Amino acid sequence: MDHVEEVEDKIPEEISAKEEKSEKKQETLEEVLSRHRKEIAQLQNKEVALKKAAAKGSKAEQKAKKKHVDDEISKLSSSLKEKHAEELASLGYNDANAKDNNKLDNLVKAIAGVSVSAPGEASKPSKSSKRREKRAQEEAARDQRIREEQSNTVSERMIENEKLERKLEPLGLVVNEIKPDGHCLYRAVEDQLAKCSGGSSPYSYQELRTMVAAYMRNHTSDFLPFFLSENKIEIDSDESLSEIFDKYCGEVESTAAWGGQLELGALTHCLRKPILIFSGSFPDVEMGKEYKPNSETSSIKSTIMLSYHKHAFGLGEHYNSIVPTPIG
């Protein structure tokens, strides 16, 4: 428990120092929203660090440490939610104002880095600025959802994790926490490949992104129908569906865009390995069954095992790596 408390003490001091510095000058709404996202990310990283520190000792000790971590994160999450709401309210942005389209538009543009001007002053927006505004609108909605659901998510996350633990324990498996930075799917697969090889992974998470993007581009006809069913596409007369999909593949390759069903499908073919996804919220899913070896022992060793978390960190989808329970 000492190491867990040591990690706890260190991170609040860093956050406190940053908060004290930010109070010295009046922040703009854009700066406040940017800081809010950073503080949420800090809390995510803290939870990962605490969980890793708690995954030591006997099962009884680990259980006690895990409860302590969950309680601590619950308190910090609620406190952060209240703090963010108060700061936004002091700048004139609250739930009531969010219903006002003009103020919401200004908020979206602020996040996107687009200047806010009167209708007569603005020139016709370019396609790139439209895309930035659309992305910013999604970010704004996501930030708002985080603040509204954060307190509920803590309890939902605990329930989800408990169900997953009950499912994994009889199999002698546990969750290996992966950093929630947008690359979690690829980092989890990288971790699994390292376990399968008994050393380091033959591919980094970035190389896996490149492989997935290339495979999806080369098999557009296989992926495009699923891409269209999962994404709301605004048809632009100057862009074909193939061009839109190619841009999506570019984001898969060069950004921290989250991976999902499409990318998992591509990974099974790129690696020629089955992927088994455990979940505490949904039935388990196995992909790439055609790559399963005949031998049951070989099948277990070669299968990539991941866990899908719907309520992780209040941000939606997250993937972790599933590994054998440590002995001792």
Image (cartoon, grey):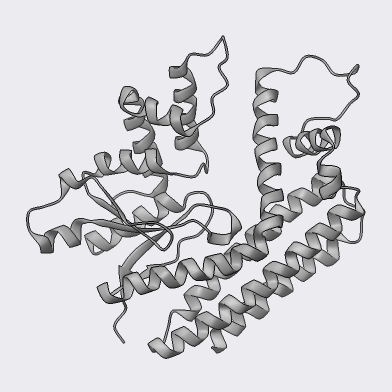
Image coordinates for residue 94, horizontal then vertical, percent: 84, 50
Looking at the image, which residue is at 55% across and 65% down? 156
Q: Residue at x 33, y 70 (%)?
A: 167
Residue 218 image offset from top left, x and y in percent:
31, 25
Reply above or below: 235 against 9.
Answer: above
Question: Is residue 162 toward the left or the right of residue 313 in the image?
Answer: left
Q: Position of residue 228 (x, y in %)?
A: 45, 27
Foreground pick, 147 / 111 = 147
Left/right placement of residue 264 relative to residue 93 reads: left
In the image, taking residue 15 as reference, residue 289 lies left or right, namely left
In which quadrant is the C terminus drawn?
bottom left
Q: Quadrant of residue 112?
A: top right
Residue drawn at (45%, 66%) of the image: 177
Q: Is residue 158 visible?
A: yes
Residue at image location 35% in from the left, 30% down from the top = 216
Furthest residue toward left: 294
Looking at the image, residue 214 sits to the left or right of residue 33; the answer is: left
Depth check, front residue: 60 or 209: 60
Q: Is residue 17 above or below residue 53?
A: above
Residue 288 location in percent, x, y? 23, 45
Q: Nearer the viewer, residue 18 or 314?
A: 314
The answer to whether residue 48 shows anywhere in this view is no
Quadrant containing the N terminus is: bottom right
Please state the total of marks drawn on the protein image: 0
Q: Quadrant of residue 233?
A: top right
